[in-house]
Image (cartoon, rainbow, N blue to C red):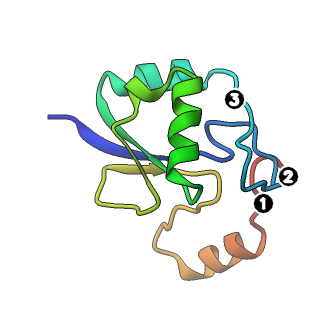
Amino acid sequence: MKKTIYIDLDGVLNNYTGNFDINYIPQIKDGAKEFLQKLSENFIIKLYTTRNKILASKWLIDNNLDSLIDDVTSEKGLCFLYIDDRCLNFNGDYAKMLNDINNFKPWYR
């Protein structure tokens, strides 16, 4: 039985750099398709995005990724793991968490 992983679109699978355009999704990031192919061997993959679901689905089709993604959603459900460019892993230490929040920058900044 495969576990589910939610993967963010912007900044993880595409070349998003913080300049949001509601009508345009940036080009696929180098290596993203191969990453998803390997991941899909052992996991159910759900795309998490706040973008329009139809536009995101078209982007997946245009990049030949639609067969690797089980669903496109704006809601994070129960899963094994979330992959996102704007997240922190809580390790039980609130003081460290506050410091990490105050010093956070996405990888592309």
Mark 1–mark 2 CB contact (< 8 Å): yes
Amino acid of disc 2: Arg
Point out the tag, 3 or 2, that comes first from the N-terminus: 3
Judging by the rendered image, the residue that carries numbered circle 1 is: 105
Q: Which residue is at a point 65% across and 80% down the rendered structure image?
A: 98
Which amino acid type is shown beneath numbered disc 1? Answer: Lys
Q: Position of residue 2 (x, y in %)?
A: 21, 35
Circle 2 sits on which residue? 109
- The residue that appears at 61% across and 81% down in the rendered structure is 95
Residue 29, labelled with which disc?
A: 3
Provide the secondary structure element on which disc 1 rests: loop
Residue 8, visible in the rendered structure: no
Disc 3 or disc 1, which is closer to the eye?
Answer: 3
- Whether residue 62 is visible here, answered yes or no, is yes
8 or 55, which lies in front? 55
Residue depicted at x 56% and y 60%: 50
| Mark 3 Cα-neighbour bin, 10 Å: few <14, some 14–19, many ≥20 | some
Mark 3 or mark 2: which is in front? 3
User: Which amino acid does the dot numbered 3 rest on?
Assistant: Lys
- The relative height of residue 54 versus residue 27 in the rendered view (above or below) is below
